[in-house]
Image: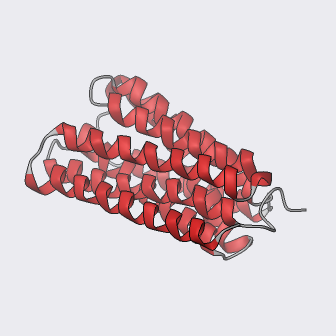
């Protein structure tokens, strides 16, 4: 494996990530045009695609399924971001499917531990408390919100479990941060849609969501560079 290829991939990841952040800032603070978010989401998909393709060609092919699941999570999540403004149910469903792919990838990366059950119950409990805070009217979407909150909680709990109960390496640190960012991003989205149409919640959602997607996309590259102790550890 060429050191030059690694350096080139690191540079590519940095350039595309910075570009996405700039588009995020443009959407939130400069010109409130949806095109900037769409460009940013497209760039996230491009970053994930480059990392998967180049990584498989030049790096560790043994962890293909873990990285492919991460890739699908990024792509489907970005698709959900594209449509959620026009069709909330479809957008939420796509995000939920994306989270499921993230969960599958996380189980490829680190084995199951019994501690995860406790972590999952705690995170789900906190999420349901948040969902049922007073003065939030979900209307006909209550069941959908509860299901989505449970799936999101399972994704976050696995991210945290991999970090604290498996290996504390760069990959698990990045995935844990990504999971937390996504969790709080969706909290902001919930407040924006169901409690207050204040644009601050919409901006906070986007400021957290795109960095989360960047980290999930970058994690594909980091995972593919690893040689040992990643796939279905025994």
Q: Quadrant of the N terminus?
A: bottom right
Q: Residue at x 43, y 56 (%)?
A: 214
Front residue of 221 and 203: 221
In the figure, 127 relative to 11: above or below? above
Horizontal side of 64 relative to 150 (left or right) equals right
From the viewer's side, name the closer residue of 59 and 67: 59
Front position in the image: 116 or 34: 34
Which residue is at the far bottom?
168
**Residue placed at 56% from the left, 53% from the top?**
51
Is 216 left or right of 167, judged from the image as shown? left
Find residue 104 and report its image quarter.
top right
Please state the horizontal and vertical placement of residue 119, each as a whole percent of the image.
65, 62
Camera sees residue 3 = yes
Q: What residue is shown at x 22% (from left), y 47% (from top)?
A: 202
Location of residue 121 in the rendering, given as x and y in whole percent from the top left corner: 64, 55
Estimate the x, y position of residue 49 in percent, counting from the top left.
52, 44
């Amino acid at each position: 494996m060429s050191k030059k290829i690694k350096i080139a991939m690191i540079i590519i990841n940095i350039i595309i990530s910075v570009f996405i952040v700039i588009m995020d800032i443009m959407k939130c603070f400069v010109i409130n045009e949806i095109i900037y978010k769409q460009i940013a989401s497209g760039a996230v998909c491009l970053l994930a695609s480059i990392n998967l393709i180049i990584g498989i060609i030049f790096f560790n092919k043994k962890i293909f399924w873990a990285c492919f699941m991460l890739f699908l999570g990024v792509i489907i999540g970005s698709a959900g971001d594209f449509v959620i403004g026009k069709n909330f149910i479809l957008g939420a469903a796509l995000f939920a499917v994306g989270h499921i792919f993230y969960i599958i990838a996380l189980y490829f990366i680190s084995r199951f531990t019994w501690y995860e059950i406790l972590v999952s119950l705690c995170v789900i409990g906190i999420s349901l408390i948040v969902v049922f805070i007073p003065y939030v009217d979900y209307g006909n979407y209550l069941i959908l919100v509860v299901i989505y909150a449970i799936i999101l909680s399972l994704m976050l709990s696995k991210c945290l479990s991999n970090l604290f109960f498996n290996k504390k390496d760069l990959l698990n640190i990045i995935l844990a941060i990504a999971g937390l960012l996504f969790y709080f991003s969706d909290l902001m989205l919930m407040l924006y849609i169901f409690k207050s149409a204040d644009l601050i919640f919409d901006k906070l959602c986007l400021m957290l969501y795109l960095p989360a997607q960047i980290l999930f996309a970058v994690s594909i590259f980091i995972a593919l560079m690893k040689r040992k102790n990643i796939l279905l550890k025994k």
